[in-house]
Image: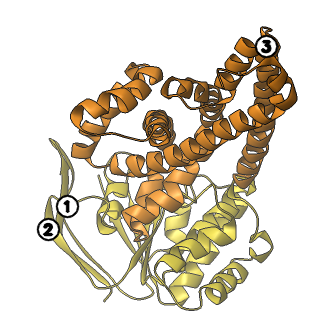
Amino acid sequence: MEHLTKSRVNGSMINYYLEGLQTTLVLFGVSLIGSILLSFILLYLYQNKIIAFFLKFYIYVMRATPLLLQIIFIFFGLPFFGIVLDRWLAACLAFILNYAAYFVEILRGGVQSIDKGQKEVASVLGLSKLFTFRMILLPQAIINTFTAISNEILTLIKDTALISIVGLSDLLKVSRSLVNATATIIPFILVGIIYLIMNAMLTLLLSLIEKRLLAQKGI
Amino acid sequence: MLLKAENISKQFNDNLLFQNLSFTINEGEVLAIEGPSGVGKSTLIRCLCGLERLTTGKIACDFPIGLVFQDFQLFPHLTVWQNLTLVANFHKIPNVEQRANELLCYFNLINKAQQHINILSGGEKQRIAIARALMLNPKILCFDEPTSALDKTATKQVIDVIQKLQNDQLGIIVVSHDQELIKSITNKVISLK
């Protein structure tokens, strides 16, 4: 990609963008699903005081250090401890671990804002802890915090640009290569427009989901 | 006999709420627990339902106990129908849909089945909370201040419902300081001071 000639670039620019877009979207999708699922599991485990102690440390580390550093550590640092990960796996793992920490904190706030009577009524009705969490607490926490969750999701799609550090060709890396090859900044402008379009579509989708969730609550 | 409480006491730190209370509940009986705010009326039924531990004494009961909370505590993200069926499905109670239909008809709420909780009136919420508790076929049903958030019409409806349940041979325990309610439905009264 770095050694493109101008003529080759003009002919197949769109293919390079598509390749970059694919990388960006796959990373976004895998990280989003992975981090949300992980955050649900961690949120449930948070109810145990001993596990909560360790989770607080994990969340602190994830939120107090740059995501870029975490990606670098997982891809370039772990091999020093004998753990060698493929660049895709390293990137996905870094994103999932980082974003799950943020989602847990947001959802934890959502659970705390639920009336404690909901837990009590579940207990009187003989519901198990897991069922109460899955069917009563978690859905309400998601509804209560959906705006904050949406913000994180929009940030995630922009953060995917950080993976070029491990050598994956995402949208930003592709456009940088094209800038080098064509000696114009048009690829940067184009990639900016692609991000704008992606975020506009995502914002629309998230606001539709939010409307549905609020309707579920009868608001 | 449905329930027997023997010498039960509850103490929070140095605050003694009630001491050496003994009572029984039989089928079709309504027991009222009255007294000023803060004497432990609600704590007493929370102990009966297992939400609080007794300091001393014991409660003997081999039957399921239901509780209708003062603020109903319906599940706000679910519809009326889901509020009734979710819990029954968890317990794998047979004929859940038929039972939910019967209860909604019984409480005159069948046309509200698909509605969300937040758009219902206080009286409707109260009846749904009772219906949800009845889904599990309890033998004893406790009410925490059932009329405190209701107007006169809704209060009358709650009294009618409690009397119907009494006729169905349920044991009822009502925490209230509504003298009108206590006079019109109860067989026994425990006064906490």
Q: Identity of the amino acid at label 1?
A: Leu
Are marks 3 and 1 in one subunit?
Answer: no
- Chain letter of disc 1? B
Give residue B116's position: percent from left, percent from top.
Answer: 72, 59
Chain B colour in the picture: yellow
Q: Identity of the amino acid at label 2?
A: Gly
Residue depicted at x 53% and y 61%: A135
Q: According to the image, label 1 marks what residue?
A: B54
Q: According to the image, label 3 marks what residue?
A: A182
Which corner quadrant of the image does residue A79 belong to? top left
- Chain letter of disc 3? A
Q: Is residue A94 above or below residue A176?
A: below
Distance of label 1 from label 2 (alpha carbons) = 7 Å
Q: Is residue A43 left or right of residue B162?
A: left
Q: Identity of the amino acid at label 3?
A: Thr
- Chain letter of disc 2? B
Give residue B136's position: percent from left, percent from top.
Answer: 48, 81
Q: Are marks 1 and 2 in contact (CB under 8 Å)?
A: yes
* Of the pair A219 and B104, the residue shown nearer to us: A219
Q: According to the image, label 2 marks what residue?
A: B57
Chain A colour in the picture: orange
